[in-house]
Image (spheres, rainbow, N blue to C red):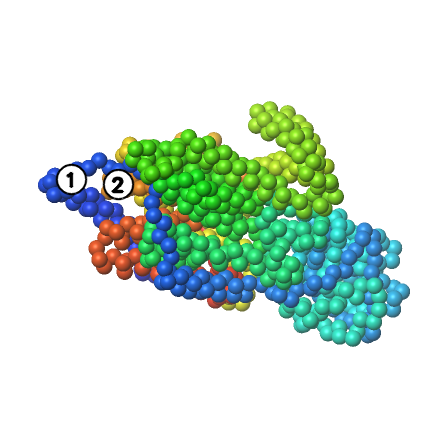
């Protein structure tokens, strides 16, 4: 057997990268251990004093940006922006639509016969079906019919006589087909000079954007000057924007069928279809549609735009956090060249806005935490206000920001404890010391305003489009009375839902006020997300996210010798390296060695419990021997994890408030998914990836501070490898067509869908 024949690029590349990552962190942890041993020897020799460790605190100096920072930040942002906006989407989709009421018929006549082997149509708002009829003379009509299999799936389309039959309504416009170019291939093409379309609506408004005819060669039939009359001229007024084929570039894909549509409905004043997430994310998305029309570029614009300023904000955050330009630049590079950052900001969903506001709310909280004890209330108030403001905006965009709110609260109270512990005594303070009790009362009261009342107002106000579409009274009095009437009902429903069992019947929440609409939607969202358990070919769990095991495939098209695909997953440098870096943060976030090992034990056991179902241990059909084997494998995994945790914990006895900050932020976004049983996907890990970059930056900062002089090259190599992988995988991140052989090289694991 020739072993070398199995060493394909798809095997060699990940193996080499894994070896490099483990060698890098092995060297780093060994460097920390040697530094610790050296310090201990110096203390024994009396060359350095044996001082007790300084108490942990967030207080410190925030380093401002200098000219070099601004240049590097601008260059990196421009490079990323160019890759993010490249082939973002078509700007020329149909903008005029033919509206249909239920049972309404529109007719079109042509000046000469049209021969169509296929129909090519672009859908608009609304769901239902169309009955398509054609005629050569305007008297005898043929209807579009379908052949279906036993499961009701359409096999083909054909023309047959219309007389004596009820309308077929064979042309579908379902919720998953909206704002897409769809093709109908006909088994018996015919010539016609008259066209008749009747709508059968299930939701209003019901609109069809454009209709084109393709000949037997798949070429568009030129209708210039041929449409002579009828009531359906809007179906043929934008023939110049008809594409050669349907693709992600000119149509909706994945959850764009929900979010782009809902954003457009907000602009139209229509009550939205997608109400399983708070409204603000779709309202932000609608700005792009208002600017550039209901086109793929328009509905993807705001997401791509929000992805760009994440980089200068992150750079500023990292420069304040570590005080070093190389660390800020390298950490920002890692996020700029992360795969999911690119893919998720280019799709018209709301995750981008959630991550953007998570970044801002943590940045402003960090600025508050760095203020030393004894700082006057007014100097810290603006940071608290801005943190609470962006937490409220983020929560009104997507519920995952609420998880980050738990991290904010934890850091806030830890920081408050540090400030109270370190509060300067009157005799040691300045001439006019800040009194503790008034400061504490002001701070707590203002925090309630910033993190409770202000977010509640923002969250409720985000439902104004819902209320306007329903035509309810938007007065303040009606809104407040709606709160008083419906909040107890919601609380009663929540209590009964979690304690009343399957027989609990929830009470109805009135929707005659803005607050009532908002509260009812919270109940709907909770019950909806609890019920999302349908299987999906690309679903994944949190323990798969942290190792990049299962990307979610957004688009797939195969041609002769090429693939066009793209998926959401993380850059392996960020995902794998960041996980080991996070273990370093975990080891340095706690003072006592026992606390560190308890953390690793709890997280390791949590991982094993989550994997028990996957390993088949809970499956009654598994044999005892198979269960024993799976159990031993999980035990070995736990021991290996604990071993690494022990090594990392003993490598450096120091503790760091920065490590604590990163650890809390990361786990506040990840830990809730341990307990969520609904169907989940890799993109749910997007907010956590942000803090993997922080963890890697933390390690790079350690290396610059404690490593040898030549370690700067090693620090720069980490984002350099990440940038190289970004370039290599770029085609499968944005949907470029690549040769099948190239795609095979990118399929590092069988679970990667390239």
- Give the image location of residue 348, x and y in percent: 58, 55
Q: Earlier in the sequence, mark 2 or mark 1?
A: 1
Query: How many numbered circles are shown?
Result: 2
Q: Which residue is mark 1?
A: 49
Q: Quadrant of residue 169?
A: bottom right
Q: How far across and down, in percent of the image, does residue 718 sit?
A: 33, 57
Q: Quadrant of the N terminus?
A: bottom left
Mark 2 lies on residue:
654
Q: Residue at 83% of width from left, 55% of height from top?
A: 104
In the rendered view, tell whether residue 598 sits above or below residue 700: above
Secondary element under disc 2, as helix, strand or loop, is: loop
> Which of 92 and 372 lies nearest the eye of the viewer?
372
- The residue lying toward the viewer, choosing from 166 and 629, is 166
Residue 697 place in picture, x, y as percent: 35, 51
Residue placed at 58% from the left, 38% from the top?
Answer: 456
Q: Characterize the local packing of mark 1: few (<14), some (14-19) or many (20 or more) Cα atoms within 10 angstroms.
A: few
């Amino acid at each position: 057997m020739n072993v070398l024949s199995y060493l394909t690029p798809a095997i060699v590349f990940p193996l080499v990268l894994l070896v490099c990552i483990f060698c890098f962190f092995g060297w780093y942890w060994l460097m920390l251990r040697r530094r610790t041993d050296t310090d201990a020897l110096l203390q024994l020799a009396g060359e350095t004093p044996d001082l007790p460790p300084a108490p942990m605190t967030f207080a410190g100096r925030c380093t401002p940006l200098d000219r070099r920072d601004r240049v590097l930040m601008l260059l990196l942002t421009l490079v990323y922006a160019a890759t993010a906006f490249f082939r973002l989407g078509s700007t020329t989709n149909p903008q005029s639509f033919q509206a249909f009421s239920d049972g309404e018929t529109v007719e079109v006549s042509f000046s000469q016969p049209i021969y169509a082997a296929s129909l090519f149509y672009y859908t608009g708002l609304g769901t239902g079906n169309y009955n398509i009829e054609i005629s050569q003379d305007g008297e005898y009509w043929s209807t579009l019919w379908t052949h279906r299999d036993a499961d009701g799936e359409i096999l083909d389309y054909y023309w047959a006589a219309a007389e004596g039959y009820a309308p077929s309504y064979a042309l579908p416009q379902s919720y998953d087909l909206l704002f897409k170019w769809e093709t109908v291939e006909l088994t018996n093409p015919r010539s016609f000079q008259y066209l008749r379309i009747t709508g059968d609506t299930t939701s209003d408004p019901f609109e069809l954007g454009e209709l084109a005819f393709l000949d037997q060669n798949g070429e568009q039939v030129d209708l210039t000057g041929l449409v002579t009359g009828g009531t359906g001229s809007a179906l043929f007024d934008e023939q110049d924007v008809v594409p050669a084929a349907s693709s992600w570039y000119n149509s909706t894909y994945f959850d764009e069928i929900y979010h782009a549509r809902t954003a457009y409905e907000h602009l139209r004043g229509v009550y939205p279809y997608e109400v399983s997430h708070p409204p603000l994310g779709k309202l932000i998305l609608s700005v792009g549609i208002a600017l550039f029309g209901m086109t793929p570029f328009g509905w993807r614009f705001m997401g791509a735009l929000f992805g760009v300023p994440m980089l200068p904000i992150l750079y500023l955050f990292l420069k304040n956090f570590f005080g070093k330009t190389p660390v800020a630049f390298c950490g920002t590079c890692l996020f700029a060249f992360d795969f999911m950052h690119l893919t998720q900001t280019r799709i018209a969903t709301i995750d981008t806005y959630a991550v953007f506001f998570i970044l801002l709310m943590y940045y402003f909280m960090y600025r508050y935490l760095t203020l030393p004890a004894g700082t006057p209330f007014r100097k810290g108030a603006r940071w608290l206000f801005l943190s609470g403001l962006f937490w409220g905006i983020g929560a009104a965009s997507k519920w995952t920001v609420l998880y980050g709110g738990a991290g904010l609260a934890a850091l806030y109270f830890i920081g408050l404890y540090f400030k109270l512990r370190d509060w300067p005594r009157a005799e040691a303070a300045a001439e006019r010391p800040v009194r503790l009790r008034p400061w504490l009362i002001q701070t707590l009261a203002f925090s309630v305003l910033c993190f409770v009342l202000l977010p509640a107002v923002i969250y409720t106000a985000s439902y104004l489009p819902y209320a306007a579409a329903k035509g309810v009274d938007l007065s303040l009095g009606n809104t407040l009375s709606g709160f008083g009437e419906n909040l107890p009902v919601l609380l009663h429903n929540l209590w009964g839902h979690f304690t009343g069992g399957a027989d609990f019947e929830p009470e109805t929440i009135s929707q005659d006020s803005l607050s009532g609409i908002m509260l009812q939607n919270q109940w709907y969202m909770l019950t909806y997300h609890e019920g999302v358990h349908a299987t999906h070919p690309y679903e994944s769990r949190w323990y798969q996210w942290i190792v990049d095991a299962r990307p979610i495939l957004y688009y797939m098209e195969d041609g002769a010798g090429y693939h066009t695909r793209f998926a959401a997953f993380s850059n392996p440098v960020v995902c794998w390296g960041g996980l080991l870096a996070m273990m370093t943060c975990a080891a340095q976030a706690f003072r006592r060695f026992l606390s560190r090992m308890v953390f690793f034990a709890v997280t390791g056991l949590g991982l094993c419990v989550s994997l028990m179902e996957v390993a088949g241990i809970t499956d009654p059909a598994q044999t005892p021997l198979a269960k024993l084997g799976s159990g031993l494998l999980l035990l070995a995994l736990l021991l290996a994890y604990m071993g690494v945790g022990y090594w990392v914990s003993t490598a450096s006895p120091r503790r760091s408030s920065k490590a604590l900050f990163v650890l809390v932020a990361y786990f506040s976004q990840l830990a809730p998914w341990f307990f969520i049983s609904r169907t989940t996907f890799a993109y749910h890990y997007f907010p956590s990836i942000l803090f993997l970059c922080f963890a890697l930056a933390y390690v790079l900062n350690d290396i610059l501070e404690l490593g040898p002089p030549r370690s700067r090259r090693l620090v720069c190599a980490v984002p350099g490898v990440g940038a190289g992988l970004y370039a290599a995988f770029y085609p499968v991140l944005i949907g470029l067509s690549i040769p099948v052989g190239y795609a095979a090289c990118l399929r590092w694991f069988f679970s990667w869908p390239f």
